[in-house]
Image (spheres, rainbow, N blue to C red):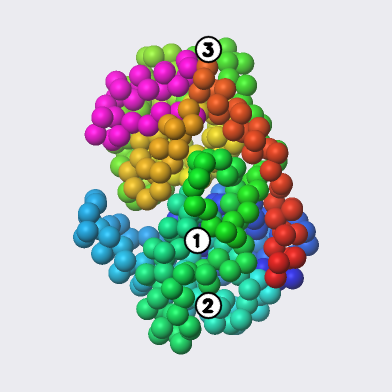
Amino acid sequence: MRVLLAATPGGGHVLPMIPVLDAFRAAGHDVALAISDDMVVPGLDEGVRRFRKEPSHFPLCPYPRGARRTAWWGRVNTEMAWASYLGTKRIIEDFSPDLVVRDAAERGAYLAAEVAGVPHVTVLAGSETVLTSYLRREQGITAPLRASLGLPEDPEGSTQVPVMGIVMTHPRFFGHGSALLANSRFYRGDSSLPVRDAGSDTGGPSVLVSLGSSLAVPHEEFARRALEGLAGTGVRVTVAVPDRFRARLAREFAGARILGFEDLAPHLDGADVVVSHGGFGTVQAALHRGVPMHITPFGSDQFFNAERISAQGLGVALPWESCTPARLAGSVWDVARGPSFRKAARAFAEDVRRLPGLDACVRDVISLI
């Protein structure tokens, strides 16, 4: 079977697609990835066929919050979806896939698949995409596109996830009584993840500051506050920022361990605490290893993730306005020293390990299409 995976041009959208791509490939299927040429994808095998697709990047919203931000993103998301539709339509004609797998923000790909009559499934890569409210919001973006393509109206958003939504975490993350998508199914993303046995190393706690690639995050200032606050406290700090900030921070904090955009798995495996903006990919990577978190959210589903982390005792959340170097360091030490956080995170990781793997996901998808 030919499987086309399509993702929007952001690390939080692309990276969750890779283990799904690998699972289809391991099962013997012919896979290809449709993605912007501007995206560097850590962990992607060089042998995987790539198709260039627009849009090339996410633009930076000039409005931090409020009605103008909502209106701006509504317009930009529609423009991006149309560009993606045109590109994915061409790729479908070229590759002739039997199945399209798209990330939840990849609106153009699902429309192109529907027009071409190709079944499609969705990787629900953001926490809010697993909630029924997401479909209602998305329907407002895709309705004019559907009309322009001559597709039937879809007031309930049922065409967006018609077969299955793939979620790579445990449903209890979302809380009891949450309205989850009816077609969502839960899997562990990687059965080989080690569960961290905190305190097994000598010296102070190991802290990974992972700030993702979202343009909403003030990466350089966040990293600076973490490095300043934790300096001289006995904490071993590793900071990961987008490549464009790495050299300047390395000069300012000589001797600090500062990484660029790369595979963070080896650093996560040895971490006692993860400091993050709260992107769902980082949250999953930490909690699935049993590592508690400090989250300072900035946008999108990060506020929801911060609330869920706090509510379940998996870490602490601190708003950016309060995130001084001293308070950030205090928060990190509270998590590092608090056995309840480690216990809760380890219990969550064990629950995730009992979920079916992505090999089962591939079989489920095939049985449903």
Q: Which residue is mark 1?
A: 104
Q: Residue at x 58, y 82 (%)?
A: 116
Q: Which mark is residue 203?
A: 3
Q: Quadrant of the N terminus?
A: bottom right
Residue 215 is covered by the magenta coloring = no
As rendered, which of 79 and 141 lies closer to the eye? 141
Question: Range of the magenta residues?
Answer: 314-338
Amino acid at dot 2: Ala
- Identify the element where label 2 is drawn: helix
Task: State the CA–CA distance, disc 1 to disc 2.
Answer: 14 Å
| Mark 1 secondary-structure assignment | loop
Q: Quadrant of the C terminus?
A: bottom right
The residue that appears at 78% across and 62% down in the rendered structure is 28
Pointer 3 and pointer 1: residues touching (CB < 8 Å)? no
Which of pointers 3 and 2 lies earlier in the amino acid sequence? 2
**Quarter of the rendering containing residue 344:** top right
> Which numbered disc flags the more N-terminal residue, 3 or 1?
1
Towards the viewer: 238 or 64: 64
Neighbourhood count class around disc 3 (C-alpha, 10 Å): few under 14, some 14–19, many 20 upward:
few
Residue for badge 2: 112
Q: Amino acid at mark 1?
A: Ala
- Residue at 53% x, 60% y: name it: 103
Q: Is residue 4 above or below residue 125?
A: below
Q: Which is nearer the eye, 256 or 24?
A: 24
> Residue 323 in magenta?
yes
Q: Position of residue 284 (x, y in %)?
A: 54, 41
Q: Secondary structure at mark 3?
A: loop
Amino acid type, label 3: Gly
**Residue 63, position in %: x, y?**
22, 55
Mark yes or no: residue 313 visible.
yes
Q: Is residue 189 above or below residue 227?
A: below
Q: Is residue 307 left or right of residue 109?
A: left
